[in-house]
Image (spheres, rainbow, N blue to C red):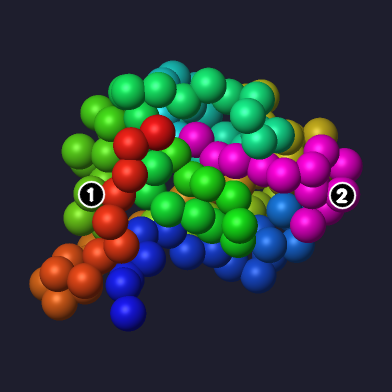
Amino acid sequence: MAVKRVLITEEAKEVMNKLREKHGELMFHQSGGCCDGSSPMCYKAGQFRVGKSDVKLGEVYGAPFYMARDQFKYWQYMQLTLDVKTGRGSSFSLEIPMGVRFLIKSKMFTESQLRDLEPLSDA
């Protein structure tokens, strides 16, 4: 079985469920910008245009998760876990009005996990 690049906590799933009720299908993008730009940003599906400078790491709870290709160079050896915490971020992410924000926790892949990673796809 392929090792997933992006996981999700139960708390983040709950927030995604509430966002889906209001906005429909979702997507995530993580860039390397300023402010909260290096945090995962949640958008209504198709609201954020991905392109050749992005890579799709996989799906998280049914939503595609993209990352800027140059940022991925730094994160490629880590498994990411999408989580949520109380507090307002300074971004345009959909969860911000709820008084929470998504964040990423990471851990290094083991050598065996690196051999069995889910394949990447272009955006």
Which disc is residue 21 wearing? 2
Q: Is residue 28 left or right of residue 2?
A: right
Q: Is residue 119 visible?
A: yes
- As drawn, 52 above or below 38: above
Quadrant location of residue 22?
A: top right
Q: Is residue 110 visible?
A: no
SS at circle 1: loop
**At x 40% / y 33%, what residue is drawn?**
123
The numbered mark, 2 or 1, whose residue comes first in the sequence reads: 2
Q: Is disc 2 in contact with disc 1, using a CB cutoff of under 8 Å? A: no
Q: Residues within 10 Å of mark 2 (few under 14, many from 20)?
A: few
Q: Amino acid at mark 1?
A: Gln
Label 2 to label 1: alpha-carbon separation: 32 Å
Q: Which residue is mark 1?
A: 76
Region of the chain picked out in magenta, as a range: 17-29
Quick check: is 22 in the magenta stretch? yes
Q: Amino acid at mark 2?
A: Glu
Q: Nearer the viewer, residue 8 or 44?
A: 44
Q: Nearer the viewer, residue 56 or 101?
A: 56
Q: Residues within 10 Å of mark 1 (few under 14, many from 20)?
A: some
Q: Nearer the viewer, residue 98 or 20?
A: 20
**At x 72% / y 53%, what residue is drawn?**
16
- As drawn, 109 above or below 123: below
**At x 65% / y 70%, what residue is drawn?**
10
Quadrant location of residue 12?
A: bottom right
Q: Is residue 97 left or right of residue 61?
A: right
